[in-house]
Amino acid sequence: MQAEILATGDEIRTGALVDSNSAHIAGMLEQNGIEVTRHQAVGDDLAMLVSIIGEISRRADVAVVTGGLGPTQDDLSSAAAAQAAGVELVEDQRALAEIEAFFSKRGRAMNPSNRKQALFPKGAACLYNALGTAPGFRISIGRCTFFFLPGVPHEMQAMLAEQVLPEVLRRQGGARAFRMTRVVSSFGLPESAVGEKVAAIGTVFPEIKLGLRAKFPEIQVKLYLNTADEANGQMILSQAVDWVAGQLEPHAFSVQERTLAEEVGDLLKQRGATLALAESCTGGLIADWLTNTAGSSDYFLLSAVTYANAAKIKVLGVSEDTLQRCGAVDEETARQMAEGARRAAGATYGLGVTGIAGPGGGSPEKPVGTVCLGLSDAEQCSSRKFTISFGRRLMNKRIFAMLALDFVRRRMLGKL
């Protein structure tokens, strides 16, 4: 069964109002195994509405239309549906009674203009709206069953869940279809490279549909499966997730839609290990990410934001000679920052981060986007240097923080 979604109204068409309804409808339909093939938005234009409804009626099995059911002149959905179906508008007595009751319960008289909201195309079935004055309706046009719903989100959502979805599933034959989704999160490869590495999934798992999403600074691989057999579907999807994660090694860090900070926290916890931070260019961002997880005090002990060289010397014990010879942005400085944080906290690991986030401060030898990472434990102190500039300061800080956490993750997993 294929479905389309049509959002109406000039506010939606011009971008003055964000169309959250279509996203909600698509999610609910997809969860129930109903493929959404198209979203459209159209303004308050009767001829355009009639034309688009006609097009949908020849393509889709089901369509959900939102908006245009109010009492004013620019509410055109009922009239457009009637014209597209080639029928007249008639007053629905049940709908009129419900509108009158809505006002009566609130001690108000119904405005005569609200009577318009009870006008439906002849042959349409009323959809009850318990939360507002705009009933919806269901009508078949061509090969498609249309569900017209109000544009007010909470009204639309209730009617979708209580009246539309049950009817759609009934028309589908009553058999529940399952729309399953899993996500593999990766870091360190561009989207094009990720796409190349997982391109063969259609051959290996022909049942799986795959999509890529750049969620800076991550690249997410989304896997979709429609099936009537939930248990078998879960098995196939799990195998596909493992395959994708294997193709992306060592860059795949989560198969459960978890952040890199959450994954690092779990690895520390599993090992009974702890972490101390010495941040400069990231300004406490890594500490913020780590402490977004409840219970992070089990493994995260200390964060020192030593932005100035004097603080690096006084708080972390970085050598003044090192700073003079090498500068603040240097692998040796990062190693000493990491070791200073580890010793101060008595942690298993110490992580030092120093770099140039921009927009100024760079040089030919150390351009904006340069970051040095140090990672210390009781046995060794290693470092890495990267030059990766995304132009904007905040983006550079985020990528620096991800590089630092990924350094810790790979050390614990033996993937350096």
Image (cartoon, grey):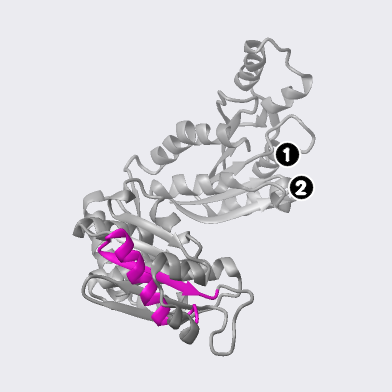
Question: Could you tell me if the residues under marks 2 and 1 are in contact, i.e. CB atoms within 8 Å?
Answer: yes
Q: Is residue 139 magenta?
A: no
411 left or right of 390 in image: left
Q: Is residue 327 left or right of residue 230?
A: right
Count the numbered circles shown: 2
| Residue 384 visible in this rendered orientation of the protein | yes
Q: Which residue is depicted at the point 60% across and 32% down? A: 136
**What's under tag 1, amino acid-wise?**
Leu
Confirm whether residue 124 shows in the render.
Answer: no
Quadrant of residue 166 within the rendered picture: top left
How far apart marks 2 and 1 lie (CA) works out to: 8 Å
Q: Secondary structure at mark 1?
A: loop
Q: Which residues are magenta?
A: 327-356
Q: 125 or 26: nearer the eye? A: 26
Q: Is residue 154 above or below residue 276?
A: above
Check disc 2 and give the amino acid type: Asp
For mark 2, what is the residue? 45
